[in-house]
C-alpha cells in the first residue's frame, strides 16, 4: 500500500475523506450504561478525533455535544447535568441536547445565538450511537442481529486499543491468525473449548479464501480441510464500515466486533457475544464479565486493558514455553491487541508484504478506499440500508463437492429467520 | 481575539514582546523559605521560559543564575553552595551571586572571563523576587500592601497550574464565576463562610461591571443587587502585569494572587492571605497551611496540587449531585484550576465568545497587549512606580443612588491609611 | 563546536556519517546472559537507532534480526523461538538467524523470497556483539584485554544512560572530574578506597594532559603532583570508537567502559572490572553485583538505574553537606550520569566553553569527526586491527625528570605481556 492510500485509510478526523465516509453511518460512541440515568454525570467521549461530552438529560434524552463551552472553552465534563441541559460550571451557560444555549445568565438575550456542536443519538444493543454526518443524510438505525435482541441475550464490552482502527479491524476479518496466536486458547477458553471444529483450525493453518462482495460489505469464506471428504468453512461477515461477525464456535454464544476510531492512533475495540434465541446462561455471562472469551480485564476505573503495551501485555514466557499460550499473552483480544499494538500506533504500511491469505484485508481496504473516493465524487456509500445488516456469520462442514457460495446463498440469505449452521 | 493577538499575549520567553514587558517588573520566583538558610541546597527555578537555579550564599545574599555551568553545561542544581558561591560538581567551576566565575581550578587565569547569566534578587512578603530586565531600568521594589506587612500578618503559598498565565489570571479578575463554581464553597469554607454578603453573590449571578483605568492597572467594580435599596459592590484590583486583589469576604482575611509564567504552558499561581492590622489568628493560619480557602493540598514534596488534570481534579460526582460542590471539585483554587486546565494548556482563543461580563478580561488583555506594543516603540510600561501598588480591593453595600467610582475615589485613594470597607 | 560538527558527532542512525563509521566495528548489543539458553525468549534491542530482536536458536546460534515481521509488521518480540528459528505469533512466518524466512505457512513457495534484516553476532567477554556494516568489511573480533580473559576474571554490567553516547563517553576520558565529583567516593567505595594514590587525585585537582595518538585511538597522560620529587600519572586509553580503559586504583580490579548509542538521546553505558591474572575475589564480585564501584542498582526488571533523572538521581543534600558525597549523588556511575543527564539528552554544544583540561575531549571529538569524514571519502577507519586493542591503562608515580611518554613506550607497548604498573 503506498503512502497516499495509507493516509486515505487511516485519517478519520473532520474533513478527511475517510472521516466524511464514516460520518455517514451511526457511530458507536460508548456503552449505554456509561450514562445510565437521567441527569447522570457527563462523560467525555473522543470519537473520530472529535472531543465530545455525552449525557442523558432530565427527561432521559441523549446528548452528545462539543466538550467545550462556547464562552471561554471550559470543559463541560466539569459541568452540571440538570433540568434538561448541561450547564458549564464556570459561568453557568447551559446547553440542551441539541447544543442550543438555553441559558446565558449574564446576557440572556444572547442565548439564542449561541449553539455548540451536537449530534443526534440513539441507543441500541446496549450502545449509545451518534450520527455525525450531514443532517439530511441520516440513515436508518443499524439492524445487526445482536442489536435487535433483548438485553438478556447479549453481552457487550469495549476496550481501548492503542492503534488506528484499521490494523485492529484487520484482525477481525482474518481467520488465518486463529490457527496461530489463538491455537492454545481455543482449547482452554470456557467460551470456545467445546467447539469440535477447533481441531480443524489447529490442523490446517492454511485457510484458502473466497470472498464475495455483498450489499453489507464482504462475505469471507475461509476454507480448511475438514474430514477426509469434507471442508471446514468459516464464514466471516464484514459489515461496512467497521463491523465484523465471528464465525460460530460450536455450541458457544455467537460473537462480533466493532472497530471505531477514537483518533488516528487509538480505537475502541467493541466485543459482543449473543444468543439469538435465548438468554445467555448465567455462568457464561459471568465469565464474560470476568474478561474471558473475547472480553478483557481492565485497569480499574478505565476501559484500558490490564495487559497493555506499557507492561508488555503481561507476557508470560513460561506459559509460552509450556504451550498454554502461543505468544505468552493471555486471552483472544489481548493476543490480537498485543500483535497489532506491537506494530506501533500506525503500522508502517510501506514495509508489509501481503500474501494470498491477506485477501480479505486487501479487499476490505479497497472497499473502504473506494467508498471514501466515491463519496468525494458524490456517489453514495454502501450498506446504508439497514436491512443489509441482517446477516450472519457461519461455520460448517460441507462435502468437498459443494461450493460454499451456493450453500451460503441458501443458508445465509434472509438468514435471521433460519437456524445458524455451526460446528 | 485573533491569532496574532493571542500569540502576543501568551508568549513570554526571552525576546518576545510580552516577555520583554514582564521583564521590566520584579518577578516572583519562589518562596523565600525554599532557600531558607545561607549555603542551602540550590533550587531549580523555571521562570518566563528560562531555566535558573536559586541559592542563598554563605553571607545570606540571594543568587539566581543560569541553571547550567558555562563549561560543559552540567546543572548547577547538582552543585555545592559553599563559601560564597555555587560550585559545579563536575569540575569545580564556581560562580558568585552575580554569575561571575570566581574559581576555575584548571585554568585560573580564565575565571574573570567566564560569567553566567544572573539576576538581582530581593525578598519581600516571604517571596524571592528577581529582576530579569535591562539593568538600567530596574524599578523600585513592589509595594503591594501584603508585601509590606510583618510575616505574622500574612500567609503565602504557590501552586503549579498547567496552563499559561493568562487563562489563570483571568479567573482572578472575574467576579462573575464566584456565583457559579464557588457558590457552595462560599458557605462552607472556614475562610469565607462568615461573610454575610455571600448571599448577594449567590442570589445575583449577573454582575454588571464598571472598569476604571488607574496608575496601577485596572479597578474593576462589579455590581450585584444587595438589599432592596442598595447595591452590593465587589471591587477587584488588577495591578499590572500579574497581581490581583480579591474583594474582602466580610471579617475574613484579605486575599490576593500573583500569576507568573513558568513557560507558555505552565504558571505559578500564588495565593496570599493577610490582615493589615494584626497577626493572622492561629486557627485560620492552620487552616491555610492545610490547604483551605484559596490554598491547596499538594502532591508530597512538590508544589503540584494533589487534585490535578491527571486525576480529573479528584472530581466527586456525589458531592456535585448533593450540592456540596458545584462542579464536584473541592476548594476555590482547584475549582478555578480545573476549569482553566480543562481548556488545555493554551486555550483555543479563536473559539471563545466573550460577552459583557467579560469586560474585565477584555480590558486586561488590551492593557497587556498595549503595554507590550508600546514597549517595542520605546514607550515605558505602566505601574513601575511602586507607590501605585498601594491600593486595596473592597466589597461594600452602597445606596443605589451612589456612584461607586465616586465612593471609591474617596475610600480607596490613599486607601492604606484608611479602614477597609467590607461586608 | 559548531552545529554541523555537533550533528556529525551525535547522529548515529542508519545512513548518517557517524552511523556508517560505527557500523564498521563490532557493536556491543547486550549481555550474553540476556539470551542465556538455546530457544530462550527473544529480547528486544535498540542499537544505533535500529529496532532489533535477539535470540539464541535451538543449536545455540546467535540471531539478531529486524524486530518486525516482513508480513504485517508485528513484533518478533512476541514470537516463538523454537526449532532453529523465530516464528511470528501472528501468522507463523518463521525466520532463521540469517533473517531468511524459512517457513511461510500459507504460501510456502514465497518463503525463499522473504528475508528480514539480520546481523552476524559473536560472544566475547560475556557480551553479545553484532556487526552491522557491509559484509565484506567485517573486521576481526575485538581483542581488548578484558574480552580475552576467562569469565571468572571479569564482571560486566550495563546501564541505561539518558543522553547521547558522546557526552557519556567524554566522562570516561576526563580524569579531571575525578578530583571533584568523585572525591569523597574514592575514599569510601570498597573497590577504590585502598588506592594510596587517591590522595594525589584529591590534592591536585588540576591535571595537565599529554595526549598521544596511537593505532587504537588515544593514550591520554594526565599528570598530577605526586611526592615532592615525583609526578602521579593517570594514563587512560581511548580505543576507537567507544571503549575506555580506566587507570588502575592501586590493588583494586582494573576497569573499563563502553559507550554505545541506543539512539541519539540514549546510550548503553557498559562497565567492566577485571583482573588479568586471577579470578575476581568473591567479596569484590559480590560488591559489584550489588551495584558498588562503577556498577549500579537497577529499577527491578530493567537496566535503568534506580537513581535517575525522574527522581533527581536520589540526591541526598545531607550527604552533600556532610561531605559523604560531593554532589549528594551516590556511586561513581550515577555521579557521572547525573551530571551528564542534567545537560539534557543532547548537550547544547553551542554554549560550552572548553579549556585546556578538556584536551582529551577535543581530541576524541576530532578523531571521531575525522573518522566519519574520511570514511565518506573512502578512507578506511582506524583501530580495525584487533591487535591494536591490546593496550592497558596505567597509573604510576614517576620522577619529575622522567617523560611519561617514554616510560609508557617501554611499559605499555606489548603491555599485555608485562605487569601493570599501579599505585
Image: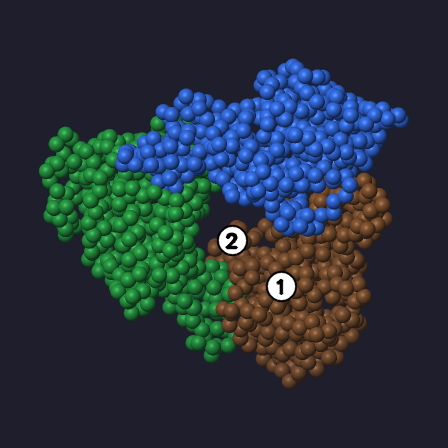
Chain colours: A green, B brown, C blue
Determine if residue B187 is in view. no
Q: Residue at coordinates 76% horizontally, 61% vertically from top-left?
A: B131
Q: Which residue of the protein is positioned furthest toward the right in this rendering?
A: C228
The answer to which of C260 and A128 lies nearer the viewer is: C260
Q: As drawn, is A395 to the left or to the right of C256?
A: left
Q: State the image coordinates of residue A170 (x, y, percent, origin top left).
A: 32, 46
Mark 2 on the same chain as mark 1: yes
Q: Chain of mark 2?
A: B
Q: Which residue is mark 2?
A: B312
Q: State the image coordinates of residue B25 (x, y, percent, origin top left).
A: 74, 65
Q: Which residue of the protein is positioned furthest toward the top in this rendering?
A: C278
Label 2 sits on a secondary structure element that is helix
Label 1 neighbour load within 10 Å: few <14, some 14-19, many 20+: many
Q: Which residue is mark 1?
A: B11
Q: Quadrant of residue B19?
A: bottom right
Q: Which residue of the protein is positioned furthest toward the front in this rendering?
A: C378
Q: Residue at coordinates 83% horizontally, 25% vertically from top-left?
A: C402
Who comes first in sequence, dot 2 or dot 1? 1
The answer to which of B175 and C33 lies nearer the viewer is: C33
Q: As drawn, is C341 to the left or to the right of B39?
A: left
Determine if residue C50 is in view. yes
Q: Chain of mark 1?
A: B
Q: How many marks?
A: 2
Tell me the distance, in whole angstroms, between the alpha carbons under discs 2 and 1.
27 Å
Amino acid at each position: 500500500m503506498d503512502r497516499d492510500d495509507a493516509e486515505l485509510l487511516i485519517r478519520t478526523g473532520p474533513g478527511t475523506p475517510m472521516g466524511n465516509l464514516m460520518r455517514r453511518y451511526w457511530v458507536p460512541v460508548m456503552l449505554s450504561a456509561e450514562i445510565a440515568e437521567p441527569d447522570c454525570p457527563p462523560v467525555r467521549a473522543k470519537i473520530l478525533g472529535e472531543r465530545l461530552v455525552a449525557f442523558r438529560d432530565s427527561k432521559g434524552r441523549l446528548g452528545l455535544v462539543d466538550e467545550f463551552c462556547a464562552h471561554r472553552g471550559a470543559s463541560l465534563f466539569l459541568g452540571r447535568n440538570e433540568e434538561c441541559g448541561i450547564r458549564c460550571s464556570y459561568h453557568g451557560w447551559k446547553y440542551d441536547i441539541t447544543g442550543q444555549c438555553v441559558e446565558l445568565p449574564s446576557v440572556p438575550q444572547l442565548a439564542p445565538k449561541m449553539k455548540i456542536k451536537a449530534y443526534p443519538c440513539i441507543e441500541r444493543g446496549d450502545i449509545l450511537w451518534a450520527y455525525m454526518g450531514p443532517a439530511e443524510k441520516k440513515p436508518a438505525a443499524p439492524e445487526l442481529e445482536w442489536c435487535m435482541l433483548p438485553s438478556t441475550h447479549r453481552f457487550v464490552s469495549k476496550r481501548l486499543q492503542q492503534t488506528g482502527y484499521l490494523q485492529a479491524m484487520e484482525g477481525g476479518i482474518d481467520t488465518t491468525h486463529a490457527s496461530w496466536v489463538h491455537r492454545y486458547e481455543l482449547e482452554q477458553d470456557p467460551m470456545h473449548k467445546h467447539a469440535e471444529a477447533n481441531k480443524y483450525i489447529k490442523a490446517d493453518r492454511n485457510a484458502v479464501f473466497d470472498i464475495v462482495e455483498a450489499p453489507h460489505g464482504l462475505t469471507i469464506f475461509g476454507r480448511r480441510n475438514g474430514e477426509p471428504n469434507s471442508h471446514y468453512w468459516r464464514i466471516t461477515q464484514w459489515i461496512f464500515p467497521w463491523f465484523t461477525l465471528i464465525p460460530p464456535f460450536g455450541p458457544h454464544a455467537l460473537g462480533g466486533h466493532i472497530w471505531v476510531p477514537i483518533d488516528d492512533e487509538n480505537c475502541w475495540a467493541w466485543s459482543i457475544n449473543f444468543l439469538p434465541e435465548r438468554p445467555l446462561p448465567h455462568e457464561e455471562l459471568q465469565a464474560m464479565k470476568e474478561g474471558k472469551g473475547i472480553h478483557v480485564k481492565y485497569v480499574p476505573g478505565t476501559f484500558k486493558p490490564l495487559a497493555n503495551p506499557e507492561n508488555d501485555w503481561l507476557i508470560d514466557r513460561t506459559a509460552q514455553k509450556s504451550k498454554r499460550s502461543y505468544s505468552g499473552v493471555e486471552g483472544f483480544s489481548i493476543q490480537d491487541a498485543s500483535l497489532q499494538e506491537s506494530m506501533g500506533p500506525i503500522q508502517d504500511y510501506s514495509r508489509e508484504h501481503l500474501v494470498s491469505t491477506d485477501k480479505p484485508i486487501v479487499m476490505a481496504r479497497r472497499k473502504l478506499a473506494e467508498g471514501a473516493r466515491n463519496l468525494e465524487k458524490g456517489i453514495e456509500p454502501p450498506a446504508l440500508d439497514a436491512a443489509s445488516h441482517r446477516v450472519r456469520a457461519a461455520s460448517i462442514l460441507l462435502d468437498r463437492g459443494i461450493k460454499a457460495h451456493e450453500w451460503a446463498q441458501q443458508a445465509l440469505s434472509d438468514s435471521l429467520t433460519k437456524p445458524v449452521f455451526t460446528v
